[in-house]
Each structure stands twice: as structure tokens, then as C-alpha cells.
Image (cartoon, rainbow, N blue to C red):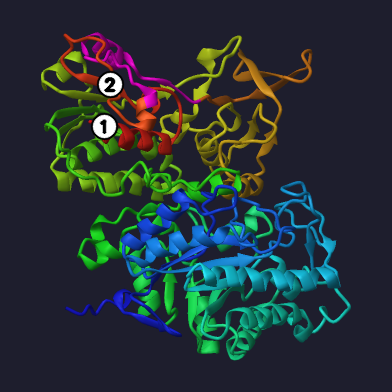
Amino acid sequence: MTSSDPLLQPYQLKHLTLKNRVMSTSHEPAYSEDGMPKERYRLYHAEKAKGGMALTMTAGSAIVSRDSPAAFGNLHVYDDRIVPWLAELADACHEHDCKVMIQITHLGRRTGWNKADWLPVLSASPVREPAHRAFPKTIEDWDIERIVADYASAAQRCQAAGLDGIEFESYGHLMDGFWSPATNHRDDEFGGSLDNRLRFTDMVLDAVRAAVGENFVVGIRMVADEDFEKGLSKEEGIEIARRLAGSGKVDFLNIIRGSIETDAALTKVIPVTGMRSSPHLDFAGEVRAATKFPTFHAARISDVATARHAIATGKLDMVGMTRAHIADPHIVKKVMEGREHEIRPCVGATYCLDRIYEGGEALCVHNAATGREADIPHIIVKTEGPRRKVVVIGAGAGGLEAARVAAERGHQVTILEASSQAGGQVRLATQNPRRKELIGIIDWRLAELDRLGVEIRYDTWAEKGDVLALSPDVVVVATGGLPQNPPLTAGDDLVTSSWDIMAGSVKPAENVLLYDDNGGHQGMGAAELIANSGARLELVSPERFFAPEMGGMNHVPYVRAFQEKGVTVTINTRLRSVRREGNQLVAELASDFADRWRGERRVDQVVVEHGTAPLDDLYLSLKPLSKNGGAVDYERLVHGGDIFPARNPQGGFVLFRIGDAVASRNIHAAIYDGIRFGLRI
């Protein structure tokens, strides 16, 4: 039966028939090995193809020249070795009728000179990009000639690999470095007038078309408004879009608005939690209306309703749901099967991108299978072994995930939760109004557990007898942890935990010092609440920069709040002790760098964040009664086999603990524990 859903309608792009209107736009998950898209890269894209999307864009971006060294795991499309790897990826996606394209670029100034071959960074003019901090040289005529040729040969490699097309990256990279008045100060034939500023782009387009012919799909992901005073204006950006659309040299426009040269600017292009959803959708629609040309776009279009609206109202021809597919690669399949309510939501945490920009690989904050497809399935299958009775202690993120996976495997699962509601530290984090979307991590799992028939017993402080009364085969301890103080020489009883502030059980005082010796969202969230309360706040950290466990994109809204509220930030400083003097507290500060240095602050309240100590009393009481004594074979956990050694044959059940019940970590770690242990039950 033919669907009337706008998202499920086919779209004809040149000779390609795209089976629906949903795509994943180009991004670099940093899964490459030696610049090649090997197994991990292939499986990541193949999973989205299995999930029903029509088009997956690889790379963000693949680099065409050796003097454009990878900034965050970029593919090396200048290297002939990439062709067979791309061909394998394309074949894997084509099996599911998913088209595959790749984004190619010269990064220009958006990289560093002290990487790879240590070649000079270049740009249209010697304007430094703050994010990557390199001072570029002015591109010369011979540079232009070789880079244009590099684009052409890179396009030929992509065509030879059997890809369905390419797109040029033209926001924040070399190509649009010529377009923007902010980065092009030239007085030659490549500067000044719009014709001149487009000359390099025209040269690349001509060379690529000559190399791949007219039938290969070529598009451009382009900034059509840099949205700052010195940058490319909306008027000029739309004019560039018109010219490209009318050139006969490109087949689609993929529209971007904004600048990416700083973390703050980047979050306006790619918003994080608490920021506007789909902020540039209407603008992309304006470009489509002005050009009457195939238009793609992605920028925090994270839900199906918004994506459907984008297509139904004619704002877009193809809608990018990129981070949404990192959270759930099977969005389209679930829509087609009438299971839209089962889609795992993207909560905007942007753990994925922050990890990339900090030198890691993309991981979803609450889908631990993404990027680990070789070892962890997105669809959990029933066990072929015996059905077991599983008791999970704790309904935080990790406990709920372990319960979900065990129930999907066909086991009988009961959850015992001490409080009156699920969520644990995730619920605590959502007390910061800006991060309330994180509750989707919990709500989705509760809905899944309801579908699977899992019983949750709230207001149950589980003790040994409560667990044994359920005659379990497996006990999962997901009790989390409790806040702990940093090591102080005195004053443990005088400080307030960040949890007390977040939970609202203790109100911020008038003059507060917050000492963050953890470096993540926990301390920053409490600091933001204190600042927004109107208190005078000094944030003290022993680190070289504050919140090192939190990436640059999530850093932005905290700093905005701190600067707007006049928060003082002090780094490289430790809290040594706290004492009471009259109605105030005196915080004694010390330094790792100058042993004799001491400082003091007189405040009304000292708030501390030092992670959590495991809440492990129940685990320790159950340990002697278990078959494995709580032990886990880590080698087998990673490489396969029975992970629970038989240390106590008289034991009645297998016992293990996950998440912060082991040690203070984060949401992703708890969920990863939940699924990888749950799969082994």
C-alpha cells in the first residue's frame, strides 16, 4: 500500500531515485583508521541503511590534499587506497537501497599545521581561525592550481568507488574562505567582487565536471548567510546559491547558516540541548524558494514531526536527521511500521560531537550500540539459552538499560528502586531547566519497559532479604553513588554538595564559592543554578581550564550564563580547607604549582563537586552468596565468552554491578555497562 506520509515519498535527484525524503548529512564520526573507512565506519553507515533512510552522506569532510591534514579523523580521499574501502561501504548500503555520497573538501584554515606532514595551513587570506588556532599563509597561484587538480582527482576516486555522488564542503573551509569578506582580503582576481570571490569555486566545479562527467551527482553544502557583521551576508549568500543553481554544474544545495570559527558560533549552527530546535529550517526554505532548486538541510531537526513538516510545507526536498540517527539509526523503519512512538529520541546532549572535537570518536550519550555495531546490536534478539529471573537494583539510566536489554532477551525482569520515580542522576541533571530534554533518556526506557512488561517496584530500599525473596538467577546492582567531598584538611561538615543545590534541598546563599574537582556537567550545572539565583559566585577549579570532562559545545551555554551573571572563574587552584568564622565560612585555597602559596575567600556557602562514591552496601552483602563472587572476566567481556567465572559453586545467582555503583563515571558509561552486560545474561 502506498503511504501518504510526506517523509516516505520518493524523490528524483537527476538519475537517482531516493526512496524517501530522509537523509543523514555528512559528518565525521572519527571512526576512520589511517584515514580509511574500514569496518567500523562501514557498519555505522550500513546500520542506517538497514534502518530505512534514503541517503547517507559519509565524511565530514574527506580531505582532497595532503596539506589539509585531518582535524578530527577525516577520511583521506587524496589517497588511492581509499577506493576499495569506499566501494565496500557503498555496496553495504546499496544492499538496502540506500544511496551513498561523500563530502570532500580542503579544510583551509580549519586545521593545524603541527599535524600529519607539518605542511603550512593556507586560506584565501592570512586570517586565523580561533577554533584551530593556526595562522594560515595566503594561498598562492601554484597552490590554487594543485588544489583544483586535487579536487578533480578526489572526485574521480569517489566515482570509481561506486558512490552515488559527492558534495563540496563550503562553510568554514577553504572554498567559502574565498566567498566571505571576513576571510578574503585579497586585491587580485580572487578578491573584491562576488565574481572574483567565486572564481576558485568555478575552477573547482569545472575541473570536477571535466573529471567525472555530467551524469555523476555533484552538490554543495554551503553557507548562505554567515550571520555576523563582517561575514557573508544573507543577500550575497542567496545570490551565490542562485548562481550555483543556475550554473548547470551542481545538482543540489545543502544549506547552512552561521559561522563555525568558535565554539560559541558553532552552537548557533549546530544547537545543543536547551537551544532552539531546527533554527535554520525557515531560512533553508527561503533559499529553496529563491532558487527553485533541490535543497537539503540539517540543523537539530531531531523529531519526525518537524522533519515531516519540512517536507510537507515545501521548505526542503531532503531533510537531514543526522544526530537523530546517531541516537536511533532505524527511524524510517519505525515510521514505516507504525512504531514512531518507539523511536529513541535525540536529547541534544551533543556528547557525540563534543567527543569528536575533543579528539575522541562519536558516541551517543544513550545509544551505546552506535559506533560499536561489530559488537553490540541495535536490535536485541531473544536468548537461545534458558530464560532467567533477573533482579535489577536501581532505576537510573544504567539499571533501566540493563533491564531493557534483559527483557528484550526474553528474561523475566524486576526492578527495585528506592525512590518514588526513576531517573537517578539524569533526573537530577534535568533540574537545570536548560537540560530538561535529558529526561528523554529515562522516559524512552520507561516506555520500552512498559511495552516489555517489566515490573518496577518504587519506594523500595532493597536489602539482602528483599532480593533473595525474589529467587533471582541474576542480580544487577545499579544503585549508583552518593556525592563525596574532595579531600580537605578540615571542614568536611561545613560544605554543601552540588547535589543539594541541584535537587533544591539547599538554596544558594548570597555569596558562594563552588569548588569543582570533577570537571563535568555536575559542577557546572550547580554553578549555573547558583548564578541564575542571583548569588555572587566564584567557580574554583584545580584544572588548567575548567570542566575538562565536558566538550567545547556544551561549554558554551555555561560560559554564557557565567559571563552574563558576573561569575568569577579561578583555575589552577585547590580548595584546602574550610572553617567557620562568625556567620561566614573561610575557604583556604592552595596551589599545586607553588607549595607555600595560600589564599582565602570569605563566603556564605562553599559548594563542592568531587564525583560520587559507590553505593555498594547491598552489593557487598550479596557478594558471598553469588556464584561468581561479583567477579567479571574483562578479557571475555571484550572478546567473547562466559564473563562470569564460577568462584562459588554453592552460590545461588550471578551478581554484577554497573555504572556509578562501580565508580564515578557518566551517563554513557552506565548505559554501555547496561547493554554489554545485559547481552551476556
Residue positioned 66% across, 74% down in the render: 152
- Residue 145 falls left or right of residue 290: right
Residue 309 rendering spot, x and y as whole percentages: 36, 75
Vertical order, 385 against 92 (above or below)? above
In front: 278, or 633? 633
Q: Which numbered circle lies on residue 644?
A: 2
Mark 2 Cα shell of 10 Å, populated few (<14), some (14-19), many (≥20): many
**For the residue labelled by badge 1, is the local secondary structure a helix, a strand or a loop?**
loop
Furthest toward the right, the residue is 187
Up/down of 533 relative to 498, above or below: below
Nearest to N terminus: mark 1 or mark 2? 2
Residue 413 point in image, percent of width and height: 16, 33
Occupied quadrant, residue 510: top right
Is residue 171 visible to us here? Answer: yes
Magenta-span inclusion, residue 625: yes
User: Residue 529: x percent and y percent?
Assistant: 51, 40
**Are the residues tagged 1 and 2 within 8 Å (C-beta)?**
yes
Q: Quick check: 94 left or right of 289?
A: left
Q: Is residue 560 above or below residue 456?
A: below
Q: Distance between the Cα atoms at labels 1 and 2?
A: 9 Å
69 or 29: nearer the viewer: 69
Judged from the image, the secondary structure of the residue bearing numbered disc 2 is loop
Image quarter (top left, top right, bottom left or bottom right) of the C terminus: top left
Residue 168 visible somewhere in the drawing: no
Residues shaded magenta? 611-635
- How packed mark 1 is, by other alpha carbons closer than 10 Å (few <14, some 14-19, many 20 or more), is some
Three-letter residue code for mark 2 = Phe
- The residue tagged 1 is 680
Quadrant where the N terminus sits is: bottom left
Residue placed at 45% from the left, 49% from the top? 40
